């Protein structure tokens, strides 16, 4: 990883001029490789790579020193058919990057920028001082992993389309994410041999199983051809990581009344009439979701969204200052004092302030006139109108798990929306060769090794106690939807043990 930046040029299949209204600054030829540097003005320089197996895609990138100047980092865009552009920001691991795994991390929403995860949770720096600067994060997940933070789908964060149009389904998004990974590993072949983990939180519970399935199927096709001259790279898919995700709505939406009335931070007493009212709506909600699962029809899926949203979710949040992502606190306000802050956290406003600084955009190679938003209302509406949120993403997982891809699902116990009850239930229902083992396994307490403090509970199947397990669920205590923000030390401990496939420190519950 200490190799110079220019030495990477020899691995390119081809270089092309990036269609960003900028003329090439310098062009060099080396065998069949065309090297192009572009001067975008205001200090922005690009390199561009095009993969011969992905004719409609090319990758442009630059180096920066923002956030964590102690590691090598790259940022830029995957250009799709010249008019759509996905932004990414990559950090090498702080420790032995040459031996560290590669992680692709994706945020949810749909339409929320992964830069909010980077700057608020597990990234190498944290937003600070009302968005004027950032501070070093000692609990960054980049301590032991090379991590790509990707803004997807189109029109999320710095990502954009020239015509302003967005996609509206997880399936469509997956095609672009796979192309990005292929070009990334073509640019950086030294990472291609490392174990690869794909993870995310919230609506990424929909994205990640889909995207992992695309990678898995592509690997199978590559293995069938066994062609040494293949233009594509085998991606060493090792595991899937889901944090407070929405993956199986049929099971998870039914858990919301249970959590609201019986959870550790319950809104109502169990005998409150509102609990009975909420639960009475669950059978119809599940019937509509089941119809979506069976038919896949937009009208069925949107109908399920509307009913379940109105009668199961909204009664708990409408007209309330409660933070549904962390029931321990109220929703924070935006600077105007009137509207709630994005996702109920004022730091989201700070992130928007910092990411909209011209100097930050220039350093990252981002489009200078692109307005950064923590979460895009347009992307959210497009996905909701397609009915995407009522599909079952869990169906993609059994084949992968049975083939050796490990699954980690964790959830902060103060989050109501994607609560730990629903997440544990869908993991238990997952039909894999580890199902019986998981059902028979009782939760045990999880402790931090140095302090001895109990920080959660773990259920795990596979591995016989000598690894982190093949199917593992973790309930993170005193954490909300953004567990890595609320419990940074615990989250880093969990993540590090998982990617290194070593057991968590556990104590038996009597």
Image (cartoon, grey):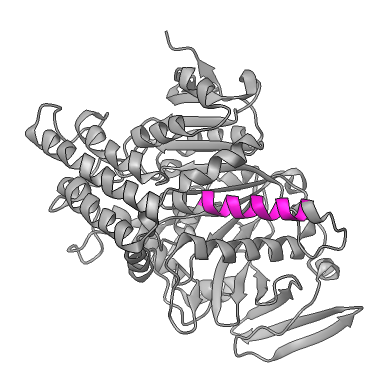
Residue at the far front: name it.
295
Q: Residue furthest top?
A: 510
Q: Is residue 256 magenta?
A: no
Residue 377 at x, y = what percent? 33, 68
- List x then y, in percent, for residue 245: 42, 45
Q: Is residue 60 left or right of residue 344?
A: right
In the depicted structure, whether residue 173 falls above or below residue 278: below
Look at 60% across and 80% down and name the residue there.
81
Q: Residue at x 58, y 66 (%)?
A: 176
| Residue 294 place in picture, x, y as percent | 39, 50
Q: Main secondary structure of the magenta part?
A: helix
Task: Magenta stretch: give its range.
Answer: 208-223
Identify whether 190 is placed above or below 449.
below
> On the picture, is 208 further left or further right than 273?
right
Residue 464, quarter of the rendered image: top right
Q: Look at the image and tell me in which quarter the C terminus lies.
A: top left
Q: Nearer the viewer, residue 200 or 124?
A: 200
Q: Which of the 4 image quarters holds residue 177?
A: bottom right
Q: Residue furthest left?
A: 273
Where is residue 444? Give x, y as percent. 46, 18
Q: Nearer the viewer, residue 213 or 329?
A: 213
Q: Is residue 446 left or right of residue 224?
A: left
* Residue 138 visible, this angle: no
Q: How many marks?
A: 0
> Residue 217 magenta-drawn?
yes
The residue shown at (32%, 55%) is 343
Q: In the picture, which quadrant includes the N terminus? A: bottom right
Q: Is residue 499 left or right of residue 265?
A: right
Report whether residue 228 is seen: yes
Q: Is residue 377 above or below residue 102?
A: below
């Amino acid at each position: 990883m200490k190799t110079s930046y220019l030495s990477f040029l020899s691995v390119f299949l081809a270089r092309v001029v990036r269609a960003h209204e900028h003329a090439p600054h310098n062009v060099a030829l080396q065998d069949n490789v065309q090297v192009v540097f572009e001067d975008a003005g205001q200090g922005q320089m690009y390199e561009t790579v095009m993969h011969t197996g992905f004719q409609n895609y090319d990758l442009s990138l630059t180096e920066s020193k923002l956030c964590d100047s102690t590691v090598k980092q790259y940022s830029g865009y995957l250009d799709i058919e010249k008019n759509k552009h996905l932004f990414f920001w990559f950090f090498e691991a702080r420790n032995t990057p040459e031996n560290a795994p590669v992680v692709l991390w994706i945020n949810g929403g749909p339409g929320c920028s992964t830069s909010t995860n980077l700057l608020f949770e597990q990234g190498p720096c944290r937003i600070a001082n009302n968005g004027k600067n950032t501070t070093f994060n000692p609990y960054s997940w980049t301590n032991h992993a090379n991590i790509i933070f990707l803004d997807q789908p189109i029109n999320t964060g710095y990502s954009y389309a020239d015509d302003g149009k967005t996609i509206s389904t997880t399936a469509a998004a997956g095609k672009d994410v796979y192309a990005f990974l292929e070009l990334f590993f073509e640019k950086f072949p030294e990472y291609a041999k490392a174990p690869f983990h794909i993870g995310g939180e919230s609506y990424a519970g929909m994205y990640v199983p889909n995207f992992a399935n695309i990678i898995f199927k592509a690997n199978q096709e590559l293995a069938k051809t066994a062609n040494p001259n293949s233009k594509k790279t085998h991606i060493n898919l090792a595991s899937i990581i889901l944090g407070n995700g929405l993956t199986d709505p049929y099971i998870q939406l039914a858990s919301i009344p249970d959590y609201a009335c019986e959870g550790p931070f319950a809104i109502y007493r169990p005998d409150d009439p509102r609990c009975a009212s909420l639960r009475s709506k669950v059978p119809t909600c599940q019937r509509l979701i089941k119809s979506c699962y069976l038919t896949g029809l937009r009208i069925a899926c949107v109908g399920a969204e509307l009913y379940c949203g109105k009668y199961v979710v909204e009664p708990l949040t409408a007209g309330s200052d409660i933070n549904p992502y962390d029931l321990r606190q109220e929703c924070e306000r935006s600077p105007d004092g009137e509207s709630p802050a994005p996702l109920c956290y004022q730091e989201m406003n700070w992130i928007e302030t910092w990411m909209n600084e011209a100097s930050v955009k220039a350093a990252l190679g981002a489009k200078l006139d692109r307005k950064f938003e923590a979460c895009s209302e347009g992307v959210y509406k497009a996905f909701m109108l397609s009915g995407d949120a009522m599909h079952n993403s869990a169906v993609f997982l059994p084949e992968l798990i049975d083939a050796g891809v490990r699954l980690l699902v964790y959830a902060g116990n103060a989050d109501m929306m994607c609560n730990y009850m629903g997440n544990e239930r869908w993991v238990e229902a997952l039909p894999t060769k580890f199902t019986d083992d998981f059902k028979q396994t009782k939760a045990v307490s999880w402790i931090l090794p140095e302090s001895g403090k109990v920080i959660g509970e773990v259920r795990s199947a596979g591995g016989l106690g000598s690894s982190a397990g093949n199917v593992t669920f973790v309930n993170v205590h005193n954490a909300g939807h953004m567990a890595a923000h609320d419990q940074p030390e615990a989250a880093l401990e969990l993540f590090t043990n998982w990617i290194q496939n070593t057991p968590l420190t556990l104590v038996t519950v009597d």
